[in-house]
Image (cartoon, grey):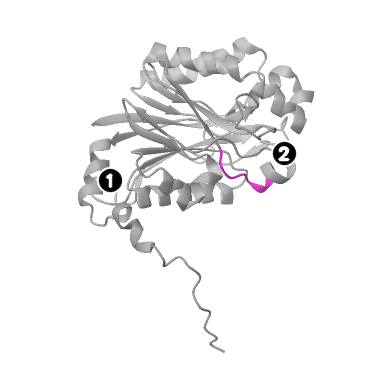
Amino acid sequence: MGGMKIATASYPLDVLPDWAGYAHKLTAWVTEAAGNGAELLVFPEYGAMELATLAGLEVAGDLEASLHAVADRLEEADALHAQLAAMHGVHILAASGPATDDLPEGVHRPVNRARFFAPSGARGVQDKQIMTRFEAEVWDVVPGGPLQIFDTSLGKIGVLICYDSEFPLLGRALAEADILLVPSVTEALSGYSRVRIGAQARALENQCVTVMSSVVGQAAWSPAVDTNTGAGGIFGPPDRGFPDTGVIALGELNTPGWVYGEVDLGAVAEVRRNGIVLNRRDWAQQSGRADPVPVMPMV
């Protein structure tokens, strides 16, 4: 294991004039990151919603219709991502979007699915595990298939989509991963802060690198992702071999573009072996201490 450059997106959504416009946009983003030496590119949660505009703004502005309009385009989008990953020799986590194909048994509604592409042509998918209130109560997007770890030439990589990053047991399930990718979309600064804090907490607990990508800016044509606040960021444990703040790289809030960071996975292995603290090893010491404790009246 050695050093690599990671590019994580602060990504604006556009009204796309046609498929060629989308292909041009994605190609430009990937070409820029690869040209700057990035080997791992991370796009955000629900960044694929801009594909709904290809069906017209009326469809894009309808919550239910937009789900299916995007799902219908994912196969074409995936082919483009795979082509770009191979062409530039990079790994790409595509922007997540609603998927309706290859659903787990018993699932009959769209799931929120990120797709992962290796330059070799290998592909994987990761579905969101726990839905936000908006997804569950308004949009009726549902949990999909289970968490998994992708064993790549860059190291072992897991994905926690947005809200999933706020749950320590989901992070712990991916404790063998060297890098956790956290694609996100958040409306308010408070939402961005929750996901960023979650991403940094998972880096601390697992003694790994976490990579947060965000949608930024306005998309008034979509009732689902109309207002977006965020920034790309790359985090590690504040320990040996990492910045004292745990912040490897951080984009300026709501500023579109790539955020780049240099990561040495040798530092992950070393901090897990001989960190000032050993959170990942010592996780088991919590066993039994998470049970409810007595409430002592002090009045």
Please tell me whether mark 2 sits on a helix, a strand or a loop: helix
Q: On the picture, is 98 further left or further right than 248?
A: right
Furthest-front residue in this view: 105
* 78 to 247, vertically: above or below: above
Determine contact: label 2, label 1, CB under 8 Å. no
Quarter of the figure that contains the C terminus: bottom right
Q: Residue at x 26, y 57 (%)?
A: 277
**Residues rendered magenta in the picture:** 128-134
Q: Position of residue 269 (x, y in %)?
A: 24, 42
Residue topped by disc 1: 242
The kind of residue on which mark 2 rests is Trp
* 228 to 122, vertically: above or below: below
The number of callouts visible is 2
Q: On the picture, is 260 further left or further right than 54?
A: left
The image quadrant of residue 14 is: top right
In front: 61, or 182?
182
Q: Is residue 34 magenta?
A: no
**Which numbered disc, 2 or 1, marks the residue closer to the eye?**
2
In front: 69, or 34?
69
Label placed on residue 139: 2
Q: Residue at x 63, y 24 (%)?
A: 101
* 30 to 183, vertically: above or below: above
Mark 2 to mark 1 CA distance (whole Å) = 40 Å
**Any part of residue 110 in sight:** yes
